[in-house]
Amino acid sequence: FDASLERPSRSPLAVAPPKLATPADLRGAIDDGAPIRIVDVRDQAQFDIQALPNALNAPLAAILQHPSAIDRLIGRLRDEAAPLDDDAAQTRADRATVFVVCRRGIDSRLAASALAEHPAFRAAYP
């Protein structure tokens, strides 16, 4: 028996982990004019002190403790894109890349994983 030939099976419901992005990736997307949304998962007090332009605040605690918070976040992300008149622009906005940010990257990884596992978020932002 050669264990190296064994491949772990994945459930068809398994979710791929979110792609890790660097600050340089975010800067590049902004500079390129790519359709993006920024979700800041720090608590409200930290967000109020300093936040990236156009970022939405969705504290990690709310995302992890209240699944309905993810549904509200999806609505807020869509509302932000709503004023676009051009159908092509609206389609690009609907398919925007979502960057999840925090102070050091730990909370954003937890939040991104929780978002990636939420069926409605996966449907909205595949």
Image (cartoon, helix red, strand yellow):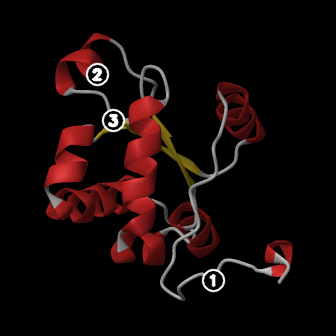
Q: Which residue is mark 1?
A: 9
Image coordinates for residue 43, horizontal then vertical, percent: 22, 27
Establish if 32 lies above or below 96.
above
Image coordinates for residue 109, horizontal then vertical, percent: 47, 42
Establish if 26 lies above or below 19.
above
Is 84 in front, or is 73? 73
In the image, which is nearer the foreground, mark 2 or mark 1?
A: 1
Q: Which residue is mark 2?
A: 47
Q: Residue visible at 77% across and 40% down?
A: 32
Establish if 8 lies above or below 17.
below
Whether pointer 2 and pointer 1 mark residues with C-beta atoms closer than 8 Å, the reply is no
Image coordinates for residue 34, horizontal then vertical, percent: 69, 48
Please give left or right for residue 102 compared with residue 73 in the image.
right
Image coordinates for residue 85, horizontal then vertical, percent: 50, 66
As drawn, the residue found furthest toward the front would be 1
Write down the quadrant of residue 54 in the picture.
top left
Q: Is residue 74 visible?
A: yes
N-terminal label among 2 and 1: 1
In the image, which is nearer the foreground, mark 3 or mark 1?
A: 1
Callout 1: SS: loop
Residue type highlighted by circle 1: Ser
Establish if 34 lies above or below 10.
above
Q: Is residue 54 visible?
A: no
N-terminal label among 3 and 2: 3
Q: Residue visible at 51% across and 77% down?
A: 14
Callout 3: SS: loop
Residue type highlighted by circle 3: Val
Q: Which residue is mark 3?
A: 41
Write down the quadrant of residue 77 in the picture.
bottom left
